[in-house]
Amino acid sequence: MLAKKIIIANWKMNLNLSETLALAKKFKEKFAGFKEGEVVICPSTLTLDHVAKIIKTGKLKLGAQNVFWEDKGAYTGEISADMLVEAGCEYVIIGHSERRRYLFENYEMIHKKVRAVLETEKLAPIVCIGETIEEKESDKRDFVLVEQLQQALSGIDVFGNQQIIIAYEPVWAIGTGTAIEPSEAEYAHKIIKLALNDMFGMQVVSKNFRIIYGGSINSKNVKKFADLEDMNGLLVGGVGLKADDFFKVVKEITK
Ligand code: PGA
């Protein structure tokens, strides 16, 4: 796995423009001298351009929360991967469980998005996978994780320094305040790594993939996640809206 941990703050649809700019400025100050890991902020699409200008000279990177799979044409309301690159994005979240749930994003759509993003050669996908509570309770987690990975990534060529982030996010742990047991996260990451090794080979996996965890991480529970095997970072929601707490989380996980 790549050595540097990556911590991604997904601001979802929580902030208006002035709140976004204020938080981006705070983040920029906090992380001015930071070099232990990579920090990515994903504000709403409408604010990407503004945030890009703020963080241009600092250490932070920009990510988007969604992308469409075609590069241009009559697709009302959609935004292409090239448009995100143009706005200054280096990352984009794909297949977040909230989109799977509320927008009915399915395997095929997620697969096409991953493909379109990799084709730009300038944008890295953050592919979210994770089991629901029903799947967990019926012992289907491992199967579901492998299935979601295969559906998203089968037949995709990974080359050069292309990066792919796999975010393991148990759906039942998102936004609940209760994270998964760290040992369970470690186990799930192992399953993911083995499935990736099968699909792409160990060399590609260690060079091009990072596996991160997401779901109710906060400045208190993060300590227990820092030393897990195959833990290459975090995708956070709630705590990413508080600059001080988020900074603590990042410091702790990159120690
Ligand atoms: P949370 O969200 O940290 O608020 O649980 C995580 C996510 O949606 O990625």
Image (cartoon, rainbow, N blue to C red):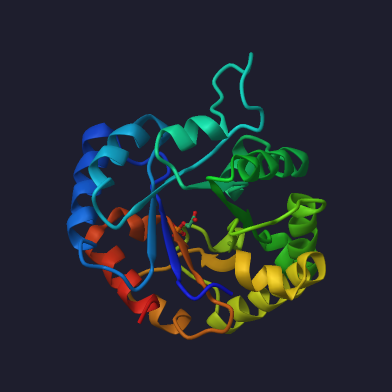
**Residue 43 at what x, y percent from top left?**
37, 42
Q: Quadrant of residue 47?
A: top left
Q: Is residue 56 left or right of residue 166?
A: left
Quadrant that contains the N terminus: bottom right
Q: Residue furthest front?
A: 160
Q: Is residue 72 left or right of residue 141?
A: left
Q: Nearer the viewer, residue 27 or 70?
A: 70
Q: Is residue 14 left or right of residue 212?
A: left
Q: Nearer the viewer, residue 43 or 181?
A: 43
**Residue 76 at what x, y percent from top left?**
58, 16
Q: Is residue 180 left or right of residue 239?
A: right
Q: Residue at the location (63% across, 58% down)?
A: 160
Q: Give the answer, above or below, for where 70 lies relative to 238.
A: above
Q: Nearer the viewer, residue 133 or 243?
A: 243
Q: Residue at the location (68% across, 69% down)?
A: 205
**Residue 119 at what x, y percent from top left?**
65, 41
Is residue 101 in sight in this rendering?
no
What is the count of numbered marks?
0
Q: Give the answer, above or below, for where 6 lies relative to 227.
A: above
Q: Nearer the viewer, residue 212 or 188?
A: 212
Quadrant that contains the C terminus: bottom left
Q: Give the answer, above or below, for where 2 lies relative to 92.
A: below
Q: Residue at the location (54% across, 72% down)?
A: 2
**Residue 198 at what x, y percent from top left?**
81, 70
Is residue 53 in sight in this rendering?
yes
Q: Give the answer, above or below, for where 178 lies relative to 111.
A: below
